[in-house]
Every structure is written in structure tokens, then in C-alpha cells.
Image: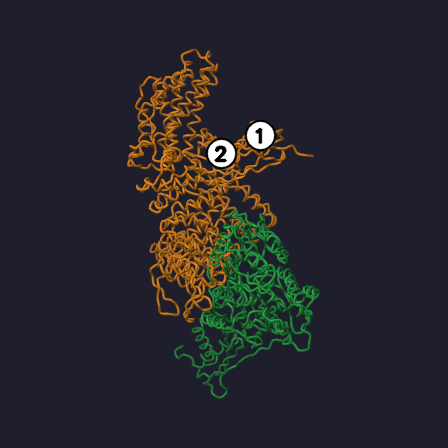
């Protein structure tokens, strides 16, 4: 039985370090190649030795697919391709290809330059790695080799995020990457057609959450910012450079535009500028509003949002500043926070989750006095707000996607085991499909039941359909033909053509049967009686009495001879070809019953 | 006229050689199928007259049988359909032939086209049941065809022509007609999605034609909702909706349990499910239909707004619920704690249904959809459902308020309008009001105005709410001063709706103090006026309020009552203040005195028929003055007053003109004086056009009077011309024309003539036989005497009469900076105007630009430039392109709005029967009385512009 094997090297019952191996119909595909934020040792990258101990990776993998540019999905890529060694194709969408190297470079800088690690990939390696990347468009079917094909679907989440369908013959797997089923201010919702894959590998970050309407969150956010600015206060929004930052920028930009506000909005410079540039370029990847209005104005060409300079932090008057990083643990956002924390008119808004131990986490949990470096005590008087803007599908969204795609099996990755358990149970209960949730390194095998396509010649099809009743979509239909299996292809042709093609002579297979009938009359009279009898019963068939004394029913021949020993017994010789088996056996059984008595 | 029609018909016959002959020749000449196709294509471009259709059809059919090429046959088949559509042609004679052609046809495409032709024929012969029966039978026979196109057409035919009345179909007639529903229903499972769609559409068509669909279809339709193809799903949603309307109370079982529910609830759940479909077309369709399912039970309805939030398997309250709780516990939203929204109780994992929860959260999804089309549809549906269910209205409020922050303006506007429509059922909570008011700062004028409109009819629950609204409106006023009128109006309603809530706020609002006198506020401050409007309107139904006013407030009341009478209601003020108030205290509230005044003054005028001319003139002058003043004061009577004033003005002009001395003197001597008479005639003509076209609500009774006045003016014109021109020839034409007009007047208003005893036209018609035969000079003489003797007609007033007005908001005309542009190029000028009581503004309103050199330019705004913010009101936002040659210094141009009229349009009493082909239309003469013109109806605005010479 054909099977699909899935082994997560990362993201199995875990978040981070996404890396999933799929082997389908003899093809091996690696989905995502991420790093783990939580570790600084070898555990941060997936264990590629699992794939092969000594051989080249290229020989074992047919392709690598990257779903989007977040580091937990692409962070290990240069290490994998340049240091471990992989020369095969890497597929990602155009925006991912554009933005991914910026983030990798940033990641490299922090690790090597700041933390001083050695034995890490270099800038050159990133460049070399990107040379192996093949960019794909949405809904474009890319033929990796003759059998393996992949296709990208829109996934929302971040700019350029995609879900991939991997297809070999009739077997297919869909990998969702991270996706979002509700549109936000700059991206649309994930969408997939009813492709009915054998397996859907879905993320399950919010497996146990059903989220509130995003409108309330947006409104709250805007209201808070607006109120503070009107009071003359300053608003600090610590963000990570890409993704949510852009959404919040658009949100504030349009609000400023609508409400005619004048207070300045700043964005801390750095890689954001470069990234914004790509957002401007990839308009087709954004949502309806931005796509429709970009002719008048590209929404990412911010009118109210300007680049930030260190000196601006001391300017009087209201302002809004987006600063990196998002958890207030270092860098510019922390510097600004220290400056503004003392004034109760100001406000800091945390738009996302904060890891324990960071300043962000401390203030969110209500701490008002912070100990900074050098035993300084910083009293936080400013208001602290928490606002969750997350772009993952919630439980309802995941179910919705499963409903859209109608897979035969579901496999959950990228989430916590306990939460997955709940969702798994729900999926099995509501869709009646198998659901799996392998841990890292654990292999799941799924047996498939692929349908095998067979070519049929048009002539034969027409002939066969003409015989029966109307074609009915719901019922299988019986057809007669010859199946030729040649060069890995299946064809259904008419027997004559098959013989011709194969250069074989046709053999006739005839069945002959003798039936004894008690009849004292002459042979030809018996024949006549048989003829009349058959004619009476088989009204729909052509029954003929030939001059040589034999009877034909369609192509079945009946001859009568007197028994050599007993003249009163006549022997009826019934002969038919293999094709007429049905009618032939019917006739013999008919004749065996004997002739009716009153034929005279 | 009868004669005329005959003539034109004859002309047609003469100039057109027989089409059929030409076609026959062409087709015979054709050597190849391609040639023949070319001829047919050429032929199809030209129309065919009714008489020759049958001949043409015969020739086409003849050729059809001979033709081997399928494409030519296809074209012929389509031509047959086209020809059967010809007006006046009855296609039953060609039906047999068309059916016959079907028998031997092999090509599927041609078959489909032929069936299409039969459909056309069938739709023309719907009254004939036997024809329909036959066609349906033919269609049923071809339903087994292997091509989807043919099956498609067959189903369409059955849908359009299938028997609808039960029992009428006689047994003997045919077997096929036994049950069309069954036949169509069998194709719900067709293998081709296009055929499935066609089958559902045919079913819907049957429903539209009045056949009651069977309930059994419901389960079939439900299965189609899971179809792979979006067209099928979209049509299936419609079908389910139809069934839910037909059998709302039937009981259907819930699969996988033994419970049963009402069909309408089940259907509602299913359609709700489709709101999260993969295709947005289906989503829009589903969201739209939800709105009209009003029989659905309330708990299903309320589920649509509930998404059953949870977080880590614990039940979570929505932000809305939290806001509500905070409100009811008397606390303001803190929102400052992390985990404020921390989930509370544990959820039983088994009980959570993630997807099959029917209607659950359908609107939450719909309102959050990616496509704004879906969001708008969802808002509309919410509106319709909320209008019929007050409890649902209460619940959906939070969601509507959230939509005020949508990224697309259309959606925001739509949700504001929706909220206004349901505002009778709701009272806004303070936190909701807060969000609503935040939108007042929106830079789009449309949004702000819609919001003012909304606030006009909102119920606010607390005095803090009122205060908040006032503060925000005043903020709005300072930010956008142009909103003044709209804000005042809004406060007027806010005040009159909530008198008791305003009462405790009065001292604070007027900043009065129990012991100290506070400075008198500036009377011209729009913000202060706004506050006063609120207070005075509240005081109307709150008699204790005036006691809180200080002296200057009373003075200001008197001033505002006079200057802004439409905003400030009459108040019954305490007795001791009467003296200081110039407003007459004897106003009796139960009877509108101004209305009375209007009628009294008119009565007076009409009664004084036989006063001496001088007296009449004076009386008319006074009355006109009174009426004009009344119109300024009483906005609701303005239309009425202006209308009558204009009429009296016309009468006055007529009388004055007839009093001229020139009539007594030999003609050629008084060239100078008659300037007045002819000017008067001209002015009367203009005024009558204004009366006819500028007022909405004018009834035919008024139109007669107006036309009568116009006739008099024309008579006057004729007399004046007769007296001033030498020679008789020009007079002949004029007299004839005038008599024609009298004639047409008689024809148009024959029913009204009995009411016009003793009038000019009455007398004229008596003299008509004499007039026709007499010479022009005599005609003039007769006219002159009749005109003098005729009585003054009483103008009856309609119930409602509004004058079309326009107000140009932008450009303001105050700018001193000239608009500079290079000569020869264009500059775009934004024009923003409000129009009131204009019917069909898209067709009638034009913008006129007058350059200093007298050059005038008329611009027709696009239909999309007009918006309709409320009944009877329109808003024109457009761009006008200006261009001119270089000037030496900046100069002002004038921009104004014109109302175009066409006298034909208003009384299309004699409609020309339209024939199908264009030739006959051209032959018709232009109607003589079709006078087109324009009336300026806005104050001109001056714009300073400066075209600079181009630099080289």
C-alpha cells in the first residue's frame, strides 16, 4: 500500500525551529528550515544528521520549501545549505526571497557581532544560499522534477507567507506554514481550494483559542493612542521590525488621515526601512483595500510616519514612536522607555507576547519599580497597556481551513502538545478524518489509497457509453476493454486495437455444448421446432434458420444431428464464442429444459 | 396626426427594397460556408421590418436544410431567434419549422442555439398553453443529450415555460408535463456543474413564475451546498432561501440526532454556514439573504453574534461583554491591566463545537471578512434583521459601532446609515456613544453628516451622554466650521428628544452662577449658538427650564428665534419676561398662524376682483412682499410662499403691462414704452418655467394655471409684436403658432377646463371659430380685449410644495489668492454643493461657469457625483475644469448651478409609440412645444483665477 511518511525535525508538539520531512511516493521534501529562539547551542538548529549520516543531503532531498520569512521557519537555511551542504532547489515566494536575507543578516549580526559566536554562517554564505532559491508565484504549479510538483496558496500571516501543496501523481500533501484566517489591515485571509489532499499539515498555535473580533482590539488600540496624544502625552509602541509593525503603522496612518491628526509618528530606522520598501513593491500580496487604492496612493508610503532620530525623544509635545525590539529587553525601545517612564501622561503599548525576564514582561505583570543596570531604580509612572495583535489562525480558523481543503488526514505541528490534543479530538470528531500529532523525530506513516488514472481512447468511451443508460455521476459503470500497461502508463483500448498494437493474432475461443433432446421426428423437423421455440422466446434477438439446416441466434450456432445409436434422441450442438458467453449459457440452459410439447 | 403617421409608414415601404429578396440573392451567391457566414453577419447588423420577417425566416430555413457547415447553421439558428423577437411579429408560424429542424440536427452547439430560439419563441407566446406544452416536451426529449450546453438550454426552457398552474395541464396533452419539478430535480445531480446550476436556476425561475416548489427539494438543495463549484453553491443558497420562505414552519430532522427544528431555522443555520464559504461570491450572496429571513427564531438570530470565545480551553468573555459589565457595575473601563481579559471558567472539552454550530458567529465572520462587498452585505443584513427584532437590535449595536472604524469609507457610511435606521429600537450606552462620537473627527464630510443625522435620532441614556455628545460636537465645530448647520440641526433634535437630561446641565452649559453675574457670551459664536439651540429645544417641553436662564439668554432667544427660526422653537416664557421679548406672546401653539396668514392674504387677493387697477396693483405688491418675508421666516412654508408670490408677481406684471399707455396710441409712436410690456411678457414666461420646474410637489391643477399664465404671456407678446412691427407677413406665422398653442392647451387640459370659468382661455375658446378665420390684425384686437377682460385665476395650493434650492459650499468665494494656471491648460476646481428638493438631479443639474469676457460654459456632472444623504436631499461633489487664454491680471469667474428643464418631459401625456427599429423614430418630427432651457437656482460664487501665459 502506498504511504506518506512525515517526520518533524522541529515544530513537532513545539513552537519554533519548524522543519518537517515528508516522503511521498518516493520523493523526499523538507518543509521549512527554522531556528529555535530559545536555545543558543546546537539545539537551535534542526538535527540534519537524521536525514543522512555521511552522504550528501542533496542526494536524499528532492527539494526544500520555505513557507515564510520568520526566522523560526527559515533561520537555519544558510547553515543547512552552506555548512551542512545542500545544493538542490529551495522554493519560496518572491516577497520571502526578498525579505528573508535581510532578517538572516540581522540574525547573523546579533549572534556573531554582539554575542561573539564563532562557527556561524557568514554574509557570503547567506548570499550563496539565496542563489539556490527558486521564487514561485501564487497558484503557480512548479514542476520540481517530472513527477513532483508544488503549488503555493495565499496564507496571510506575514507578507509573502504561503501554504504549499506538494503533489506526486495522485498523492498530495498540503503544508500550511503559519496562516491567518481573518484579514488584517494589510494582509488578506488565507485561502485554499477544495484540493482534497491526502494529508494536511497544519500549524496549531492557537489550537484552544477562539478569538474575539479584531475590530474591538483595533478600536481599543486607536482610542488609547488618540486619548494619550490629545492629552499631550507620548506613546511608545515596542515592536519587532517586520509583520505586526507594518499592520500597526497602516492602522495609525489611516487613523491619522481620517481624523486629521497632526501629532508626529516616528518609526525607528534600521532594517525597517528596507523592509518597508519591499512592502511597497509587493502590493499584490496585500489585502483588498491596499490593492485597490494603490493607484491613488501606495499605503506603505506613509505620510504621517517619519524616520526616528535619537534626539526626537526629548522633543516636547505629543508623539507616537514605534521602536525595536518588541520585548523592551534592549536597544532603542528600552532607551526611549527609560526616558519616558517617569511621566504619567505617557503610555507604552505592548502589542505582543513578552518572554519572561524581559522588561516588557515585568511591566505587564504590574511591576512599577524596575531595577536597571547599575542598581538604578526606575519608577514606572507611565501607563502600560497590553494589546494582542497576532496573526495566527484560531481554532475556528483552523477548522475552517480543514473544511475548505477537505483533506483525508490531518497532521498538527507548531503548537503545544496539550492544546493539540484538544484540537485533534475535535477534528476527528467533526470531520471523521484521522489526525496525527507526532513529536520531534517521531515518524508518522499514512497509508493512502490513490486513484490511478487510466487513459481511454475516445472511440471506446463513446461506444461504451452509448450502450448503457445515461451516465450517472454517482454510480460506477462497467466497461469492456483491454488494459495495456506499458512504459509506466495505463491505457484502456478496444480489444482489436490492443491486438493490433501488440502485433498479436486474434484467437477465437469457442464453447461447444451438446444437448440431447428426445424427439422422434426427422432432423429438419426438430430443427424447425427448435427454431420456432427460440423465435418465440428470444424476441429481441435475431434468430435465423439457415438453408444448411442450422440455426443462428446472433452469432451462436445450433446444429442438430441424430444420435448415432438412438434415432429418437437428437443431439443439438450449440457453439458460441467467448464474447457471447452469457447468451450461450442461457441458450443451453433453455434447450436443456427441453422443447415444449405442443408445437404441432 | 393620423395623416402624418400614414405618410411616414408609406415612405418606409418606398425606400426599402424587400430585405428577403436581397438576402436570398446573397445566400445563393455564397460559394463557401465562410462567404455565407459573412453575408449572414452583415444581414444581422440591419433591422428587418415586421412584414418581411416571415419571408426572411423561410429563406433562412430553406438555406438551413441545405447547409452542411455547422457554423452557418448556428448563425442561422441565432438569427431565427433574433427575428422572432421583432416587435409585432407573431412567431407561431415558424415554431413548427424550428422544432422540425431539431430532429435531424447532429451538432450540439447548433442544437443548443435552436433550443435558445425556441425559448425566445416560447416567451413571446406565453399565453398559449399548448405551444408551451409542446416546447417543454421537446426540451424533455433533449434532456438526455450528452452535451452540457444542450441540457443547459433544455432546463432553461423548462424553467421559463414549464406549466405553473396545477390541474390546467390535461392528462391527454402530454406525459412530459406531468411534473416539471421532478424532471428538473433529477438534474440536481448532473455530472456537469453548469447543468446543475442551470437546474437550480430553472427551479428558481419556476418559483418566480408562481409555482409552489415542493418541500422535498429542500434536502436535495442542502446537499448542493457542499458542491465543489461556486456557481452551484451560490444558486443553491438562493434556492434554500426560497424554500425557507415557502415553508418556514415545517419541521425538519437534525441529522445524527433525533431532534427536529423548524425549517426556517435550519435553513438559517445553513446559510449562516455559507458566510464562511471559500468563495466570496457565495459569501456575499449568503450574507445578503440572511437579512430577509425574518421568521427565524430569536435564539438562532442571537447566535449569529456570538462566537463563543475561549482561550486555552477556558471560556472568555468578549470585549463587548466586558465593556457592558464595567458599565453596569458603574466603573469606567480600566483596560490597563494585563490579563484584564483573563479567561474565567473551564470549558467542558466535549461540549465545545468548533464548526457545526450552525448560525454561531456568522455575522462576526461576515463583518470581519476580507472583501468589503461581504462586509457591506453583512451590515445590510444586520440592519434588516434589527429592524424587525428590537432585542437583536440591542445586541448587534456593539458590532455596528465597531464597523464605524472600518478601513473602507463605504462600509463606515453604510453602518452609520444602518444604525440610524434602527435607532428607534435602541438606546446607546455611554461607552458606545463614546465610540460613535469619536468618528465625528473623521475628515470625510459624508461620514460626519451621516453621523449628525444619526445623532438626531439617537436615544441617549444619561446626562453625561448628552454632555459628551455636546462636547464632541463642539469639538467637531471648531475643527470643521463648515459643518455648522448640520451640527445645529443635530443639537436641535438632541435637545428636543432629551429635555429631562438637558435640564440638570443648563447652569453648567450657560455658565450661570447663583450669586455672580457672568459675562455675556458672544452672540455670533457658532459654538454658543449650538449650546443655545440645544437648550431652547429642550426647554420647549420642559417648562421649568426658563427659570434657569439669565437675562441675556432671553435676549438671545429673541434674536435667535427671529434669525434662525427653523432651529429655535417658540417657547412659552414666564409672564414677566414677556415685555422684553418682542415675540408676540399670543401665539397659540395648536394652530399654525403662519399657514393661516398665508391663506388669509391669498384669500384677500382673490376676492378683490373688481378693485380699481391702482388698488389691485398696490394690494398685489404688498401681498408679494408679505409672502416673501414669510418664506424667509418659516422654512417649512417657504416653498408655498415663494410659489404663490411668483404667481402673484406674474399677475402683477401682466396687469402693469396691460395698463401701459401704448395701447391707446397709434402703434409706431411708442416704441420706447413697449419695452416694458415686452420685458414683462418675457419675465412672465421665465417665471412660469420656474414655477413649473423648480418646485417639487406641483400637481396638475397647478400646472394648468401655470400654463394658462404662460399662454397669457404669449398673447401679450403677440400683441406687443403686432403693434411694433410693420407689415403683416410675420404676424401670420405668429398668429398661427399662437392658435396652435391654444389648441394644444385645450387638448392637454381638457379635464381642467370646467374649473376655469371666465378665464382668458375660456373666453378665447368661445371665440375660437372666429379667430381661426379672421386676419391677424383682428386676432390681435380680439386677444387684447380678452386679455383685459379675463379674470384672475385662483391658484389652489398643494399639500406639500418645496422649492428646489442649491447651496454651493465650495468654492467659498472668499479666497483672495487667485488660482493660477498656465493658459491653454486646465485647472480643476472642486465644487461641493447641497441640493434640496431636486427631482432627478442626475439629469437636470448643471454647473455653469461664467468668464469675465461673457463666455459661458455649462458642465454636466457625472451621475456618480451625486449622493443622496437623505430624502429630498442631494449632494453634488464634482470637479469643474477651467481653462482660458492668458490674462494680464487675476479676475473673478462666476460659478453657479443651473436646473435644466424640458417641457416635454414633465407632461409626457401623448407618448409616442416606440417602434422597434430606429428608422421610424428618426422620421418623427421634433415636438414643437419641446422647449428646453435652464433656470439658475443657486447664488453665484466668485472664484479668483489667473491664467498665466505659457513660458517658452
Can you tell which chain is drawn green?
A: A
Chain that bears disc 1 = B
Residue B799 screen position, x and y as percent: 34, 35
The colour applied to the residues of chain B in this rendering is orange
Q: Left or right of B929: which side holds B767? A: left
Q: Is residue B328 visible?
A: yes
| Other-residue count near label 1 (Cα within 10 Å), few / some / many at <14 / 14–19 / ≥20 | some
Residue B641 screen position, x and y as percent: 37, 30
* Of B190 and A362, the residue lying toward us: A362
Q: Which residue is mark 2?
A: B897
Q: Left or right of B655: which side holds B867? A: right
Which of pointers 1 and 2 indicates the residue nearer the eye? 1
* Of A36 and A425, the residue lying toward us: A36
Chain that bears disc 2 = B
- Locate the C terminus of chain B and report the quarter of the image it occupies: top right
Q: Which residue is mark 1?
A: B891
Q: Image quarter for residue B487?
A: top left
Upstream in sequence: badge 1 or badge 2: 1
Amino acid at each position: 500500500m502506498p504511504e506518506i511518511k512525515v517526520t518533524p525535525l522541529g515544530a513537532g508538539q513545539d513552537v519554533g525551529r519548524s522543519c518537517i520531512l515528508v516522503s511521498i511516493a518516493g520523493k523526499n521534501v523538507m518543509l521549512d528550515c527554522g531556528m529555535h529562539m530559545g536555545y543558543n547551542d546546537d539545539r537551535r538548529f534542526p538535527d540534519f544528521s537524521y536525514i543522512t549520516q555521511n552522504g550528501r543531503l542533496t542526494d536524499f532531498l528532492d527539494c526544500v520549501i520555505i513557507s515564510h520569512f520568520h526566522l523560526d521557519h527559515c533561520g537555519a537555511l544558510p547553515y543547512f545549505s552552506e555548512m551542512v551542504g545542500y545544493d538542490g532547489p529551495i522554493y519560496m515566494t518572491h516577497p520571502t526571497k526578498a525579505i528573508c536575507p535581510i532578517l538572516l543578516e540581522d540574525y547573523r549580526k546579533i549572534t556573531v557581532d554582539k554575542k561573539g559566536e564563532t562557527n556561524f554562517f557568514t554574509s557570503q554564505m547567506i548570499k550563496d544560499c539565496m542563489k539556490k532559491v527558486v521564487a514561485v508565484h501564487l497558484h503557480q504549479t512548479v514542476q520540481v522534477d517530472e513527477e513532483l510538483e508544488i503549488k503555493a496558496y495565499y496564507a496571510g500571516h506575514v507578507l509573502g507567507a504561503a501554504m504549499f501543496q506538494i503533489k506526486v501523481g495522485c498523492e498530495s500533501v498540503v503544508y500550511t506554514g503559519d496562516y491567518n484566517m481573518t484579514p488584517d489591515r494589510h494582509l488578506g485571509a488565507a485561502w485554499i481550494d477544495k484540493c482534497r489532499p491526502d494529508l494536511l499539515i497544519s500549524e496549531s498555535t492557537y489550537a484552544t483559542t477562539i478569538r474575539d473580533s479584531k475590530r474591538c482590539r483595533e478600536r481599543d488600540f486607536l482610542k488609547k493612542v488618540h486619548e494619550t496624544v490629545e492629552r499631550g502625552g507620548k506613546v511608545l509602541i515596542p515592536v519587532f521590525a517586520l509583520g505586526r509593525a507594518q499592520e500597526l503603522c497602516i492602522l495609525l496612518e489611516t487613523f491619522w488621515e481620517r481624523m486629521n491628526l497632526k501629532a508626529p509618528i516616528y518609526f525607528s530606522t534600521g532594517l525597517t526601512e528596507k523592509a518597508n520598501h519591499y512592502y511597497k513593491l509587493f502590493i499584490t500580496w496585500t489585502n483588498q483595500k491596499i490593492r485597490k487604492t494603490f493607484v491613488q496612493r501606495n499605503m506603505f508610503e506613509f505620510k504621517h510616519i517619519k524616520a526616528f532620530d535619537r534626539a526626537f525623544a526629548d522633543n516636547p509635545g505629543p508623539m507616537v514612536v514605534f521602536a525595536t525590539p518588541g520585548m523592551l529587553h534592549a536597544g532603542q525601545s528600552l532607551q526611549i522607555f527609560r526616558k519616558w517612564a517617569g511621566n504619567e501622561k505617557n503610555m507604552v503599548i505592548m502589542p505582543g507576547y513578552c518572554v519572561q525576564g524581559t522588561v516588557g514582561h515585568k511591566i505587564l505583570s504590574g511591576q512599577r519599580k524596575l531595577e536597571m543596570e547599575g542598581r538604578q531604580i526606575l519608577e514606572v509612572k507611565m501607563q502600560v497597556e497590553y494589546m494582542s495583535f497576532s496573526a495566527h489562525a484560531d481554532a475556528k480558523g483552523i477548522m475552517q481551513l480543514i473544511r475548505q481543503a477537505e483533506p483525508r488526514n490531518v497532521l498538527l505541528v507548531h503548537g503545544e502538545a496539550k492544546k493539540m490534543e484538544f484540537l485533534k479530538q475535535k477534528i476527528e470528531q467533526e470531520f471523521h478524518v484521522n489526525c496525527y500529532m507526532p513529536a520531534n523525530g517521531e515518524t508518522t506513516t499514512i497509508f493512502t489509497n490513490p486513484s490511478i488514472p487510466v487513459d481511454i481512447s475516445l472511440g471506446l468511451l463513446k461506444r461504451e457509453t452509448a450502450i448503457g443508460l445515461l451516465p450517472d455521476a454517482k454510480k460506477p459503470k462497467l466497461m469492456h476493454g483491454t488494459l495495456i500497461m506499458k512504459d509506466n502508463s495505463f491505457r484502456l483500448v478496444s480489444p482489436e486495437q490492443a491486438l493490433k498494437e501488440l502485433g498479436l493474432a486474434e484467437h477465437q475461443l469457442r464453447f461447444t455444448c451438446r444437448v440431447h433432446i428426445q424427439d422422434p421426428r426427422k432432423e429438419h423437423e426438430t430443427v424447425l421446432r427448435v427454431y420456432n421455440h427460440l423465435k418465440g422466446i428470444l424476441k429481441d434477438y435475431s434468430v435465423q434458420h439457415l438453408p444448411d439446416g442450422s440455426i443462428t441466434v446472433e452469432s451462436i450456432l445450433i446444429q442438430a444431428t441424430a444420435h448415432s445409436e438412438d434415432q429418437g434422441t437428437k443431439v443439438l450442438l450449440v457453439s458460441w464464442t467467448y464474447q457471447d458467453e452469457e447468451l450461450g449459457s442461457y441458450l443451453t440452459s433453455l434447450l436443456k429444459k427441453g422443447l415444449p410439447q405442443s408445437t404441432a | 396626426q393620423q395623416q402624418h403617421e400614414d405618410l411616414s409608414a408609406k415612405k418606409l415601404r418606398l425606400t426599402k427594397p424587400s430585405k428577403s429578396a436581397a438576402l436570398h440573392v446573397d445566400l445563393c451567391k455564397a460559394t463557401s460556408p465562410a462567404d455565407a457566414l459573412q453575408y449572414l453577419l452583415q444581414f444581422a447588423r440591419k433591422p428587418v421590418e415586421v412584414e418581411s420577417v416571415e419571408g426572411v425566416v423561410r429563406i433562412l430555413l430553406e438555406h438551413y436544410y441545405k447547409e452542411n457547415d455547422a457554423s452557418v447553421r448556428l448563425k442561422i439558428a441565432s438569427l431565427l431567434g433574433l427575428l422572432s423577437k421583432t416587435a409585432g411579429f407573431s412567431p407561431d408560424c415558424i415554431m413548427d419549422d424550428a422544432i422540425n429542424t431539431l430532429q435531424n440536427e447532429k451538432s450540439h452547439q447548433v442544437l443548443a442555439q435552436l433550443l435558445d430560439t425556441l425559448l425566445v419563441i416560447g416567451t413571446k407566446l406565453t399565453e398559449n398553453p399548448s405551444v408551451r406544452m409542446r416546447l417543454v416536451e421537446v426540451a424533455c426529449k433533449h434532456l438526455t443529450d450528452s452535451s452540457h450546453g444542450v441540457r443547459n438550454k433544455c432546463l432553461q426552457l423548462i424553467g421559463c415555460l414549464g406549466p405553473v398552474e396545477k390541474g390546467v395541464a390535461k392528462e391527454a396533452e402530454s406525459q412530459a408535463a406531468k411534473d416539471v419539478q421532478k424532471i428538473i430535480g433529477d438534474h440536481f445531480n448532473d455530472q456537469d456543474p453548469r447543468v446543475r446550476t442551470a437546474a437550480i436556476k430553472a427551479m428558481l425561475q419556476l418559483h418566480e413564475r408562481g409555482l409552489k416548489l415542493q418541500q422535498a427539494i429542500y434536502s436535495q438543495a442542502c446537499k448542493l451546498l457542499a458542491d465543489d463549484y461556486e456557481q452551484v453553491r451560490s444558486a443553491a443558497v438562493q434556492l434554500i432561501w426560497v424554500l425557507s420562505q415557502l415553508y418556514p414552519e415545517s419541521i425538519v430532522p437534525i441529522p445524527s440526532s433525533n431532534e427536529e427544528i423548524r425549517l426556517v431555522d435550519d435553513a438559517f443555520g445553513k446559510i449562516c454556514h455559507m458566510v464562511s464559504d471559500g468563495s466570496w461570491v457565495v459569501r456575499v450572496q449568503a450574507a445578503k439573504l440572511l437579512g430577509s429571513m425574518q421568521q427565524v427564531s430569536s435564539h438562532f438570530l442571537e447566535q449569529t453574534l456570538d462566537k463563543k470565545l475561549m482561550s486555552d480551553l477556558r471560556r472568555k468573555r468578549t470585549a463587548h461583554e466586558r465593556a457592558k459589565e464595567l458599565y453596569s457595575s458603574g466603573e469606567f473601563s480600566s483596560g490597563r491591566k494585563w490579563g484584564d481579559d483573563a479567561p474565567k471558567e473551564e470549558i467542558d472539552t466535549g461540549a465545545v463545537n468548533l464548526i457545526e454550530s450552525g448560525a454561531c458567529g456568522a455575522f462576526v465572520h461576515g463583518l470581519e471578512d476580507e472583501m468589503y462587498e461581504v462586509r457591506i452585505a453583512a451590515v445590510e443584513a444586520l440592519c434588516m434583521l434589527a429592524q424587525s427584532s428590537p432585542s437583536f437590535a440591542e445586541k448587534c449595536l456593539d458590532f455596528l459601532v465597531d464597523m464605524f472604524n472600518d478601513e473602507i469609507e463605504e462600509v463606515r457610511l453604510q453602518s452609520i446609515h444602518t444604525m440610524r435606521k434602527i435607532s428607534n429600537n435602541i438606546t446607546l450606552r455611554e461607552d458606545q456613544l463614546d465610540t460613535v462620537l469619536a468618528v465625528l473627527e473623521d475628515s470625510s464630510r459624508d461620514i460626519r453628516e451621516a453621523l449628525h443625522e444619526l445623532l438626531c435620532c439617537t436615544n441617549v441614556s444619561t446626562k453625561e451622554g448628552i454632555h459628551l455628545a455636546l462636547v464632541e460636537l463642539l469639538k467637531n465645530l471648531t475643527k470643521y466650521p463648515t459643518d455648522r448647520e448640520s451640527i445645529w440641526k443635530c443639537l436641535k433634535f438632541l435637545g428636543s428628544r432629551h429635555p429631562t437630561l438637558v435640564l440638570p446641565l443648563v447652569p453648567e452649559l450657560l455658565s450661570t452662577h447663583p450669586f455672580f453675574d457672568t459675562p455675556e457670551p458672544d452672540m455670533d459664536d457658532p459654538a454658543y449658538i449650538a449650546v443655545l439651540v440645544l437648550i431652547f429645544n429642550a426647554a420647549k417641553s420642559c417648562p421649568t427650564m426658563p427659570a434657569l436662564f439669565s437675562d441675556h439668554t432671553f435676549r438671545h432667544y429673541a434674536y435667535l428665534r427671529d434669525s434662525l427660526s427653523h432651529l429655535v422653537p417658540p417657547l412659552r416664557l414666564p409672564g414677566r419676561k414677556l415685555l422684553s421679548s418682542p415675540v408676540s406672546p399670543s401665539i397659540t401653539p395648536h394652530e399654525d398662524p403662519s399657514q393661516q396668514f398665508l391663506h388669509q392674504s391669498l384669500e384677500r387677493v382673490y376676492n378683490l376682483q373688481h378693485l380699481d387697477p391702482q388698488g389691485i396693483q398696490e394690494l398685489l405688491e404688498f401681498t408679494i412682499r408679505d409672502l416673501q418675508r414669510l418664506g424667509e421666516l418659516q422654512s417649512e412654508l417657504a416653498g408655498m410662499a415663494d410659489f404663490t408670490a411668483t404667481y402673484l408677481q406674474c399677475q402683477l406684471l401682466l396687469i402693469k403691462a396691460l395698463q401701459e399707455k401704448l395701447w391707446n396710441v397709434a402703434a409706431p409712436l411708442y416704441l420706447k414704452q413697449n419695452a416694458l410690456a415686452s420685458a414683462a411678457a418675457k419675465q412672465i414666461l421665465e417665471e412660469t418655467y420656474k414655477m413649473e420646474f423648480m418646485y417639487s410637489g406641483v400637481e396638475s391643477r397647478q400646472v394648468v394655471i401655470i400654463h394658462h399664465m404662460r399662454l397669457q404671456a404669449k398673447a401679450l407678446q403677440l400683441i406687443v409684436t403686432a403693434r411694433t412691427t410693420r407689415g403683416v407677413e410675420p404676424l401670420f406665422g405668429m398668429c398661427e403658432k399662437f392658435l396652435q398653442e391654444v389648441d394644444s392647451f385645450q387638448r392637454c387640459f381638457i379635464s381642467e377646463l370646467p374649473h376655469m370659468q371666465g378665464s382668458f382661455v375660456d373666453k378665447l375658446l368661445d371665440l375660437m371659430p372666429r379667430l381661426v378665420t379672421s386676419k391677424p390684425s383682428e386676432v390681435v384686437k380680439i386677444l387684447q380685449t380678452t386679455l383685459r377682460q379675463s379674470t384672475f385665476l385662483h391658484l389652489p395650493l398643494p399639500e406639500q410644495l418645496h422649492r428646489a434650492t442649491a447651496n454651493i459650499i465650495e468654492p467659498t468665494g472668499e479666497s483672495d489668492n487667485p488660482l493660477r494656471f498656465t493658459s491653454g491648460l486646465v485647472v480643476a476646481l472642486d465644487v461641493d454643493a447641497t441640493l434640496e428638493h431636486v427631482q432627478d438631479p442626475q439629469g437636470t443639474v448643471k454647473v455653469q461657469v461664467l468668464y469675465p469676457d461673457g463666455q459661458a460654459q455649462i458642465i454636466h456632472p457625472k451621475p456618480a457625483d451625486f449622493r443622496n444623504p437623505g430624502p429630498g436631499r442631494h449632494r453634488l461633489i464634482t470637479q469643474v475644469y477651467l481653462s482660458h487664454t492668458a490674462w494680464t491680471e487675476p479676475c473673478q469667474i462666476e460659478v453657479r448651478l443651473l436646473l435644466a428643464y424640458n417641457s416635454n418631459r414633465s407632461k409626457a401625456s401623448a407618448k409616442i409609440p416606440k417602434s422597434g427599429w430606429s428608422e421610424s423614430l428618426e422620421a418623427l418630427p421634433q415636438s414643437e412645444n419641446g422647449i428646453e432651457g435652464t433656470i439658475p437656482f443657486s447664488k453665484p460664487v466668485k472664484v479668483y483665477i489667473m491664467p498665466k501665459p505659457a513660458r517658452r
